[in-house]
Image (cartoon, rainbow, N blue to C red):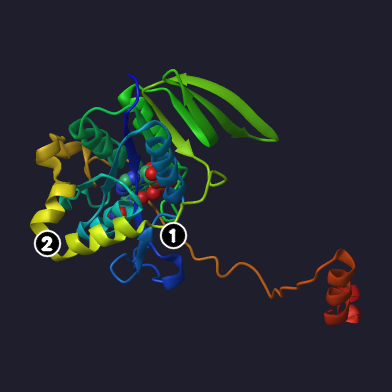
Amino acid sequence: MPAPYEIFVLVKQVPDQGSKAGLNPDGTIDRARAKRMLNPFDRYALQAALNVKKTYGGRVTAISMGPPPAVEVLLETLEHGVDRGVLLSDKRLAASDTLATAYALYKTIIWAGHYDVIFCGLQTTDGDTAQVGPQLAERLGLPQITYCQDFRIAADQVYADRIIEGGYQKIISQMPLLITVANSYHRLEYKSFHGSWKVQQLLRNTEEQNKYIQSVDLDVIGADEQRCGLKGSPTIVAATEKVGEIGGNCSMHEGHSAEELVGEVVQSTNLQEFLAI
Ligand SMILES: Cc1cc2nc3c(=O)[nH]c(=O)nc-3n(C[C@H](O)[C@H](O)[C@H](O)COP(=O)(O)OP(=O)(O)OC[C@H]3O[C@@H](n4cnc5c(N)ncnc54)[C@H](O)[C@@H]3O)c2cc1C
């Protein structure tokens, strides 16, 4: 499969943690009240996908599963240079656990067509399981590189550095494959002017938007609804407990040298109080 490549990237819309949306009485996240954002970990996966396109040529498809407002994250990816978005949205997906989510995304990927490489974020900031990428690779029968810090492609093989405790593994894999991208990978670059302009046009014209973002439901992708949503989710969240705010007071110090910095910290610290700790 020589370049140009078909590159897929999975992106999830998550509650903005800054918006302090809180929990429903049953312990689930109150998503309706929360401000929404692109999962921060998916920003690295998106940059990896765009880098493959920039370096080797190809087309990037962003895929998301979520309620209709999740189209916002797909539009955001278009601003960064993604070529096509696919949104899987269906009420029958409500209360999906990771097994059901991975099944539904797997069916969406098959529906979306040929791919050479699939990028996922490492984890999400709401579900936080880091299970979806590996489950997808299993279902698709693909080799997977998780915790990928960096990679290059040569002769249709991927050469990757995978983070392990205390160092890296050097991994070589055939394509197609699935990669979960670590948050030590390159930061997401700024949106392009052209991308932002294009999205502004799409926001004014639904027909035009539909050319770039395909909305699908379980029937379109041929998914078995018994394996989706609550019916397809063997995991039960028995309870969720709030443990309160973590952290304490913190002050920032600046200085041009180590001496200056230490001097500043000593001056601003109540040494008596400090030594009493
Ligand atoms: C019993 C139960 C009920 C739940 N009910 C709901 C519910 O009603 N509504 C709800 O929104 N969540 C619900 N969840 C959470 C939901 O299961 C997870 O958010 C979802 O399975 C993804 O897992 P994760 O967030 O841990 O993803 P991770 O495995 O941490 O994500 C890894 C990567 O996979 C990709 N990915 C993950 N999810 C998606 C997605 N949806 N679209 C595109 N890419 C994705 C991203 O690239 C992401 O970085 C429920 C969970 C449980 C256990």
Q: Three-letter amino acid code at disc 2?
A: Asn
Query: Can you say whether 22 is above or below 186 in the image?
Result: below
**Residue 125, picture quadrant:** bottom left
Pick the front one: 130 or 5: 5
Q: Is residue 103 above or below residue 187?
A: above
Q: Residues at badges 2 and 1 in contact (C-beta under 8 Å)?
A: no
Residue at 36% across, 26% down: 138
Of all residues shown, which one is farthest toward the front?
Answer: 194
Vertical position of residue 6 compared to residue 271: above or below = above
> Which mark is in front, 2 or 1?
2
Q: Residue at x 21, y 43 (%)?
A: 231
Query: Residue at point 41% right, 35% down?
Result: 52
Q: Describe the element under mark 2 as helix, strand or loop.
A: loop
Of 105 and 258, nearer the camera is: 258
**Badge 2 or badge 1: first in the primary sequence:** 2
Q: Which residue is mark 1?
A: 240
Residue sitting at x 70%, y 73%: 250
Inspect this view and state whether residue 172 appears.
yes
- Tell me if mark 2 has few (under 14), some (14-19) or many (20+) residues whose alpha carbon lies within 10 angstroms of its own: few
Is 252 placed above or below 239 here?
Answer: below
- Which quadrant does the C terminus fall into? bottom right
Q: Residues within 10 Å of mark 1 (few under 14, many from 20)?
A: few
Which type of secondary structure does the marked residue at label 1 adopt?
A: loop
- Measured from the top left, where is residue 258 in percent x and y? 86, 64
Circle 2 residue: 205
Q: CA distance from mark 2 to mark 1?
A: 42 Å
Residue 1 in the image, given as x and y percentages of width and height: 33, 19
- Horizontal side of 18 relative to 29 (left or right) equals right
Q: Visible in this render: residue 213?
A: no
Dot 1 amino acid type: Thr
In this view, the residue in front, 231 or 225, is 225
